[in-house]
């Protein structure tokens, strides 16, 4: 397979930094362009991130000296030097939507971490193991945009990356009626560290703007169907959520309650999780975890610090599956965990790009 030339738009932010780390020595992709706002443009990448570098490892030598381009003013140069871009810009929704569409119309595919196009009916919102078939809507999107190669694909919100994958095989086999989930979300989801957000230390904040609406609506698009030129959201299950910010660096943990249309035994559910594979596992994509969902038998697992990094942060972990009380409206409850800046952000977008590359959409 040829090496694709890629760019990272929004490369200096926390998710952009994670893209840099995940794409370093990638089997299929070479980072050729790093772009950000005019504030960073014209400086070397190492200088532009400076003391804001938040990754565990130092800035890779291969990108230190790359001159950061302006995502808007250097547009023509960027699209001439790459095959496609990853996007993690920090702009308003309207500005993000316009910029991503500008790149797509210039025949430069966009794999976006941003939320601006998640509700656009002909833009696939991919969790690659769950709804790879939604890639088909790209044909309709290209007709609307008037492009042959350009398109936009997005990844879903980080808050749903732990529980939607765990619920998906249950929905497919037994049917889902309703879901209640509380997510306990790390500070990197707000692009913060303990140094930049000292007030979170020894504290819990019971509100994250916009997260609950995304957590309730986005799964229904992921579980939706392509009808004509758009993705129609699923009518079920009913989902209600609470999203809470906690003092952890990385990792979004969820407590989930669910009711099924058909009866299922606990052992059957655990077996289904352990055996569940999606298109990325079938295709053996470079970033795909070998086992997508890991189940822990221990009562005190998964734990955020111990288990967020399973399979390079790309796997989902679950535990504490229990039948709920007979008087409860829910059949079962469990705990699940994902790494929010890897599987939930940059890693999920890289895996989506790998999926679309393998399916021929980048050519």
Image (cartoon, rainbow, N blue to C red):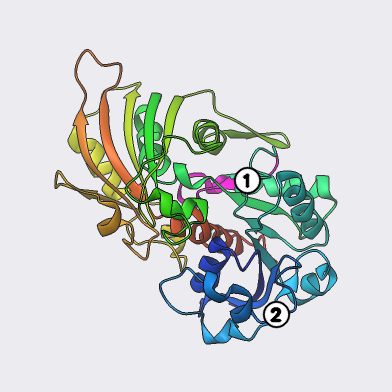
Residue 255 position in % (x across, y down): 31, 36
Q: Is residue 148 something one can see in this rendering?
A: no
Residue 137 position in % (x across, y down): 67, 44
Nearer to me, 289 or 50: 50
Above or below: residue 251 compared with residue 260:
below
**CA gap, disc 2 to disc 1?**
28 Å
**Is 8 colored magenta in this rendering?**
no
Going from the N terminus, do you reach mark 2 or mark 1 first? 2
Q: Is residue 259 something one can see in this rendering?
A: yes
Looking at the rendering, the stretch of residues picked out in magenta corresponds to 122-133
Mark 2: few/some/many CA within 10 Å (<14, 14-19, 20+): some
Mark 1: few/some/many CA within 10 Å (<14, 14-19, 20+): some
Above or below: residue 137 compared with residue 152:
above
Residue 118 position in % (x across, y down): 63, 42
Q: Residue furthest top?
A: 327
Q: Which mark is residue 43?
A: 2
Q: Quadrant of residue 67?
A: bottom right
Above or below: residue 119 compared with residue 46:
above
**Is 132 colored magenta in this rendering?**
yes
In the picture, measured across the screen, residue 47 lies left or right of residue 142, that is left
Q: Which mark is residue 31?
A: none
Residue 339 position in % (x across, y down): 39, 55
In the picture, measured across the screen, residue 10 lies left or right of residue 155, that is right
Q: Which mark is residue 115?
A: 1
Label 1, secondary structure: give it.
loop
Label 2, secondary structure: give it.
loop
Q: Which quadrant would the C terminus be assigned to in this image?
A: bottom right
**Which residue corresponds to the image point at 51% horizontal and 60% vertical from the top-left?**
351
**Which residue corresponds to the image point at 59% horizontal and 30% vertical from the top-left?**
233
- Cβ–Cβ under 8 Å for marks 2 and 1: no
């Amino acid at each position: 397979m040829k090496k694709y030339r890629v760019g990272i738009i929004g490369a200096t932010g926390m998710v952009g930094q994670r893209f840099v780390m995940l794409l370093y020595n990638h089997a299929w992709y070479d980072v050729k362009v790093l772009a950000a706002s005019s504030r960073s443009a014209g400086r070397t990448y190492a200088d532009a991130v400076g003391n804001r570098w938040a990754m565990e490892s130092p800035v890779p030598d291969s990108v230190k000296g790359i001159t950061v381009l302006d995502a808007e003013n250097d547009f023509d140069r960027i699209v001439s030097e790459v095959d496609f871009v990853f996007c993690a810009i920090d702009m308003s929704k309207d500005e993000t939507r316009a910029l991503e569409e500008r790149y797509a119309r210039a025949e430069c595919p966009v794999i976006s971490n941003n939320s601006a196009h998640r509700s656009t009916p002909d833009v696939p919102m991919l969790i690659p193991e769950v709804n790879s078939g939604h890639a088909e809507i790209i044909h309709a999107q290209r007709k609307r945009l008037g492009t042959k190669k350009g398109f936009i694909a997005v990844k879903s919100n980080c808050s749903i990356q732990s529980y939607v994958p765990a619920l998906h095989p249950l929905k497919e086999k037994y049917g889902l009626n309703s879901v209640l989930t509380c997510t306990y979300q790390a500070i990197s989801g707000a692009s913060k560290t303990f140094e930049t957000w000292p007030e979170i230390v020894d504290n819990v904040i019971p509100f994250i703007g916009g997260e609950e609406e995304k957590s309730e609506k986005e799964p229904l698009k992921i579980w939706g169907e392509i009808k004509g030129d758009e993705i129609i959201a699923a009518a079920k299950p009913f989902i209600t959520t609470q999203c809470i910010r906690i003092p952890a660096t990385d990792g979004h943990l969820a407590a989930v309650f669910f009711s099924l249309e058909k009866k299922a035994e606990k052992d059957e559910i655990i077996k289904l999780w352990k055996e569940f594979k999606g298109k990325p596992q079938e295709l053996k994509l470079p970033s795909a975890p070998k086992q997508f969902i890991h189940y822990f038998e221990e009562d005190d697992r998964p734990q955020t610090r111990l288990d967020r990094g399973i399979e390079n942060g790309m796997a989902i972990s679950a535990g504490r599956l229990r039948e709920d009380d007979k008087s409860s409206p829910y059949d079962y409850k469990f705990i699940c965990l994902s790494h929010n800046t890897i599987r939930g952000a940059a890693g999920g977008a890289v895996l989506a790009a790998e999926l679309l590359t393998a399916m021929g959409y980048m050519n």
